[in-house]
Amino acid sequence: MSNPRVLLHLGLPKTATSSLQHNVFQKLHEHEKGRINFLGKCLDYDYKTGRINVNNNTGNFIRHAVEGTLAIKEARLKLAYTLRSDCLNVFSDEGLMVAYPGKKNRPLVDKFQNLVKMFQDYDVKVVVTLREPVDYLYALYVELYPDFFCNVNELNSVQKYVEYLLSNPKDVLFESFFIDRWLPELESRFEVIVFRYDQLLGKDSSWYQGWAEILGLSVDEFSHNFDSQKLNVKSKSNKEVKKTVDFKGVESKFRSILAKNRNIFNAVRWLYNVSLLNKVLNYRFSSRVTHQYPQGEQYERLQRLLG
């Protein structure tokens, strides 16, 4: 039996990863002949509510192993039962490239080394899509703002985030922005195929052709699937994305008051969770205010730093 072929799609985030996962990988996986073995991830994330519906996350154990929360030996046993030898096995998780504020984050070089250990003896290719660094920084900040940055006073605006980056460029939080540092590290360990997001934006045929060849499809079939549905589209004012607002502060205030009496807290919490009030207070509304894109001197300093 031939050695299983594996494609690791590592993003970057905000480079059409959701469209690839939903429109292409999952559809090929669900085909009656199982044209690829897609291990995920494929999630429906509702930006308005923060709710997640899991369509396919079979290979979630891979991320746990790479991030050090699951033993490599145990993960490799699961991998042996999960991979197929008769088709391409695809794992796609752009989150591996990202560090999250408030969480314990491993350096990318450690993650890459764990990927090597995880897929030792398999036929592996890695695909990454790169994006102009400042645009990528802005798009990623907007994506993570409702769940992470809005809760950190020191990072609750793009300007604060950029200033912190300029002052602490070696912080693991910012690793994925320094492409010239991590890409050679990745290329020293795997065969890496690089796409560029501006190719997609410009409808460059080489982007479609490249992905079609990797997946063994015709260009027409790939483009038909990929372009079938727009995903993860946010409300914008020109180039800038509108902020989201919610009433979670009200929830937090009442939680702190009621927590003093455990019996009352448990009763109110049950009523709250089964009521519409829970949904209302956690619903995210689009504001008229936008996340301000880096400008002027700050933009120039950022450009010099990121290249």
Image: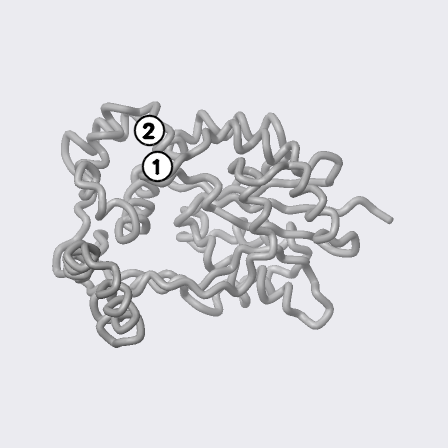
Report crowding for label 1: few under 14, some 14 to 19, many 20 or more residues within 10 A (C-alpha).
Answer: some
Residue 306 x/y as whole percent: 33, 28
Residue at image position (73%, 40%) is 123
- Residue beneath the point at 45% across and 29% down: 107
Identify the image quadrant of the C terminus.
top left
Density class for disc 2 (Cα within 10 Å; few <14, some 14-19, many ≥20) is some
Residue at 25% across, 62% down: 235
- Indicate whether 46 appears above or below 161: below
Tell me the amino acid under the disc marked 2: Leu
The residue positioned 34% from the left and 23% from the top of the image is: 170
Left or right relative to 68: residue 89: right
Going by the numbered disc 1, the residue's amino acid type is Pro
Give how far across and how far down residue 157 sits, in percent.
18, 43
Q: Is residue 293 visible?
A: yes
The answer to whether residue 243 is visible is no
* Residue 281 or residue 219, whichever sits in front: 281
Look at mark 1 in the image and give the residue it sits on. 133
In this rendering, the answer to whether 140 lies above or below 191 is below
Circles 1 and 2 in contact, beta carbons < 8 Å: yes
Residue 259 placement: quadrant: bottom left
Residue sitting nearer the eye, 219 or 167 = 167
Vertical placement of 235 versus 113: above or below?
below
- Report how far apart the C-alphas of labels 1 and 2 lie in the structure: 7 Å
Q: Position of residue 298 (x, y in %)?
A: 17, 31
Callout 2: SS: helix
Relative depth, front residue between 189 and 198? 189
Q: Which residue bears the numbered disc 2?
A: 306
Quadrant in the rendering for residue 288:
bottom left
Q: Which mark is residue 283?
A: none
